[in-house]
Amino acid sequence: MPSLTPAERSQEATNAALYDGLISGGLTLIPSTAVVYTAMKNPAFRKATNWQSRTGLTIMPPLFMYAIASEMKLNHKMKEMASESEHHKKVSHWAENKHASGVDMNVNAALISTNSTTELTRSIQKKTADIGVEKRLHEIYKKSVEDSGIRIVPGDSLGVHHKIANFWQENPFKILAAVSLPTVLYIFRGRNDQKHLQMQSKLMHTRVYGQFTVLGMLLAFMSFKNYMDSSGKFITQEEADFRVSEMKRMRADLLERIDFDKKMKARREGILSKTQVDVQKDLRIGSNSTKKLNGIAIEDA
């Protein structure tokens, strides 16, 4: 199960950014290699370039996509973690308010508050009530995770098709660019083999066929993205349990902060009360001293 420490969450965000950057760079490498390979058939291109410049033309677009995709994924992942944390806080507050109002827990509260029970029975009933509360809160957290727009896959790892679907949902235009550019180049290659066509006709045919193909792929890709947005991304059961544990941890932290604030408030009130008593005592002593001085002055007179 993933760790709840900030260092592990930071490592998780870094790994996600690295993985997304490698995928984007690999997808960009395909069309960049195809472009250079096609350009190598042109004698003017071969004459104007050497192997260093050709290598640069091949690898620089993937490196650029790796850098920008990693940065964007890292930013997205940090915002996603912040959103999850805020969601967990809101659910914890809601669960605590529901528990405080006594919804579905009146029977346990009545058993605990009964004056006729012995101390042992009262302790057993309190432990039973606490167990019931924890189970109830666990179910609330679990239901909240299930209803947060996700689809839970049993086990601790996603299948290849699940990972592809999640990547497709998050990066539809990257996939479109990686697929459409080689497709357009393939169409142009087919038009270019037809020697009877002039260059402007070849370009016109490529634009028409390429535009139709790219628009068709765009509709297909965005339809699948819309389906994933409405149905939810895939996560493992392990990650779902991790989110529930994160909510329970945040609830425990909230209760600790509330208890600490109560103790600090009680301590401040105690210090203020003691200070007021000391001030009143000093005022009484000062008043008695003044009366004695006045009496001595009258006797001397």
Image (cartoon, helix red, strand yellow):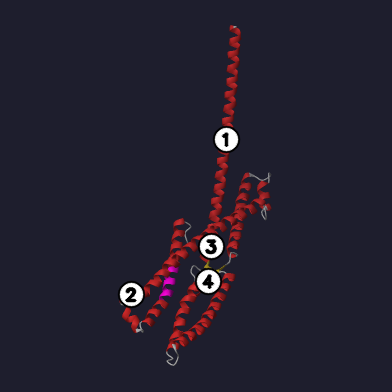
- Give the CA distance from mark 2 to mark 1: 78 Å
Chain-order first, disc 2 or disc 3: 2
- Give the CA distance from mark 2 to mark 4: 35 Å
Q: Any mark on residue 241, and which?
A: 3
Badge 2 is on which residue? Answer: 53
Instruction: Identify which residue, 206 or 298, lies in the foreground.
Output: 206
Chain-order first, disc 2 or disc 1: 2
Q: Secondary structure at mark 1?
A: helix
Tell me which secondary structure the magenta stretch mostly adopts.
helix
Chain-order first, disc 3 or disc 4: 4
Chain-order first, disc 4 or disc 1: 4
Q: Residue at x 59, y 10 (%)?
A: 297
Evaluate if marks 3 and 4 touch, with contact meaning CB atoms under 8 Å apart: no
- Give the CA distance from mark 2 to mark 3: 51 Å
- Give the CA distance from mark 4 to mark 1: 58 Å
Q: Is residue 141 magenta?
A: no
